[in-house]
Image: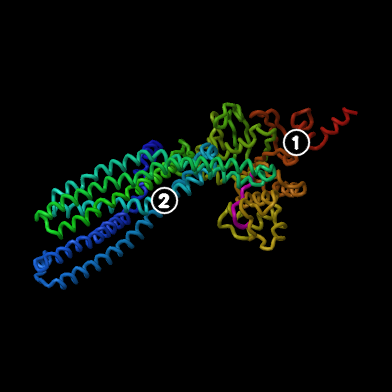
Amino acid sequence: MDKETYLQTSRYPFLRLLNYMRGERKNYLTATLYSVLNKLFDIFPEVLIGVAVDVVVNRKNSWLATLLGNPDMMFQLVMLGVLTFVAWGLESVFQYLYSVKWRNLAQAVEHRLRMETYQHIQSARMQDVDKTAVGQLIATINDDINQLERFLEDGLNQIIQITASTLLIGIIFLICSPIITVFAILPVPFILLGAFYFQHKLEPKFLLVREKAANISAALANNLTGLMTIKSYTAEQFEGRRIESLSQDYQNANRETIVISSMVTPVIRIIILTGFLFTLMIGGYKTIHGAMNVGVFSLLIFLSQRLLWPFSMLADVTVNFQRAMASTTRALNLLTWEKEEQTGKQLVSGKKQFDSSGISFNQVVFSYLGSEKPVLDDFSVTIRDKETVAFVGESGSGKSTIIKLLCRFYLPKSGNITCNGANINCFDLKNWREKIALVSQDVFLFEGSIADNIAYAQKNADMDKIWKAACIAGVDKFIHQLPDGMLSDVGPRGAFLSGGQKQRIAIARAVLKDAPILILDEATSAVDNDTELAIQQALAKISHNKTTIIIAHRLSTVTNADKIYVLDKGRIIEQGTHQELLKSPTYYRHLWSIQTGEYQQEIETADC
């Protein structure tokens, strides 16, 4: 569905919700049938009670005696008792059946909406994902979509049963007394108007409640992730007050909703009572004057409550509906995010094949959302096939942005990136990323075993391949020391491992992927010198037939690169090999002297 359609349906979220039920049409119709039959057998005993009153009052001249041709009152009452028992039994059976159907239908719709929302986020542009807190996304995918459950399980069933009972009882009323029918259903339009009025009032209130709930989820996710930082800065009270403030906002938003939603039931009940009074007064008058027998009057009295009291459920239906629609709207808002371009315009069909020959950045300009200052400014560089290049420079010089553009996490504002002469946007996105093995500075390990995390690059890899990758990354000795070895749990986000251990596992994951383009974004920033040397020796072997791009602050990591590019404010200011850049008074030489201690020695000598 395109963005315009999503925007239109987000204004009418119930229509969009119905779209998710189309795949369950058969179950939906079956559940509706069960609900109608349940209501039919729920009403039937009331009819039988009216007939029983007629039997007791009119005895041998009762309507049932005439129908059965048997004036025996006990026989008539036994027949009514049997029919009542059967009706109640069938009513219970159909209640069980519709309950199972509606609940399963609710779970199916929730699952479909949750998966579409999650898959859409996975394929969305990073600029949209980055501007939204993780806690907000989790709240929408999980909490908001779970809010649909009560409405889908009970709300739709209640609407169907109210409709069915109104039609069935309305027909009985019409047969018994058209005049009473008019007065009995007179409150119905006012009940519906009241329900719609409160629904309109509650709509923005519930949307605000869900937003406040998402704010709490975002703050909690952020604080629990950074709990060590909070403790180290003794900021527990500060963060506690911040969460308290957000919780208070949520409470206040709910308070306004509670005031309005609590008015719905009393108002509707007052309107319902007027219909009951009409039936009581007019029916009683006709019965007293002989225009209506006692059995029919009793039947109408019983059914008048059955006709109108179900409308009191509209209060709960209205509240559940608006809560569900507020949650659906939040999910629909995520579905308006633009997706990443999977293929470029130059592709006609199929997946274009390529190698990593000649990756070129051609006058690339890029700035992040909300910033006018370009991170890369007229940036141009060419990386030859199977060449190892390094980008160095101060923080904010644009080094990591190069990687984000190359991986197509972001698109350049102007200029282009080509591979073997073709714009990389021409390639199938999945196919292009399969050609890149990325070891990021911020290593992410999934909860599970070490083997699971290394094999994430190649899901069907056997243990021999996993161990080989671990050996190349220099993490095999550490793994052998663990009680469970390769099957040891890494903990949430790798919490059971040190920074260096996590980084080496990430390198092993990249080794196993065996992609033609290898990217190391500060890949050795969290390892000691001995481990760094071992990793460099390993990388020298695995990068022999790969195009390797290294992003580094530690210049010792890039000494063996075929070419080093020094960046400053998004531009290349120097380039050459390590030795070439050290021969002249370059900025690179300045950085090298600082990191090796030569700069400090020069200062001390000058002070002397």
The image shows a total of numbered marks equal to 2
- Image point 24% across, 61% down: which residue? 41
Q: Main secondary structure of the magenta part?
A: loop
x then y, percent, for residue 301: 20, 55
Above/below status of 177 relative to 16: below
Q: Is residue 444 magenta?
A: yes
**Few, some or many residues within 10 Å of mark 1 (<14, 14–19, 20+):** many
Stretch in magenta: 442-451
| Residue where numbered disc 1 is placed | 578
Q: Is residue 602 magenta?
A: no
| Residue where numbered disc 2 is placed | 112
Query: What SS does tag 2 mark?
Result: helix
Q: Earlier in the sequence, mark 1 or mark 2?
A: 2
Number of the label disc, if any, that sits on residue 189: none
The front one of 55 and 4 is: 55
x then y, percent, for residue 416: 55, 32
* Quarter-of-image position of residue 73: bottom left
Residue 18 visible, this orientation: no
**Few, some or many residues within 10 Å of mark 2 (<14, 14–19, 20+):** some
Query: What SS does tag 1 mark?
Result: helix
Above/below status of 341 relative to 70: above
Residue 304 visible, this orientation: yes
Whole-angstrom CA distance, mark 1 to mark 2, is 55 Å
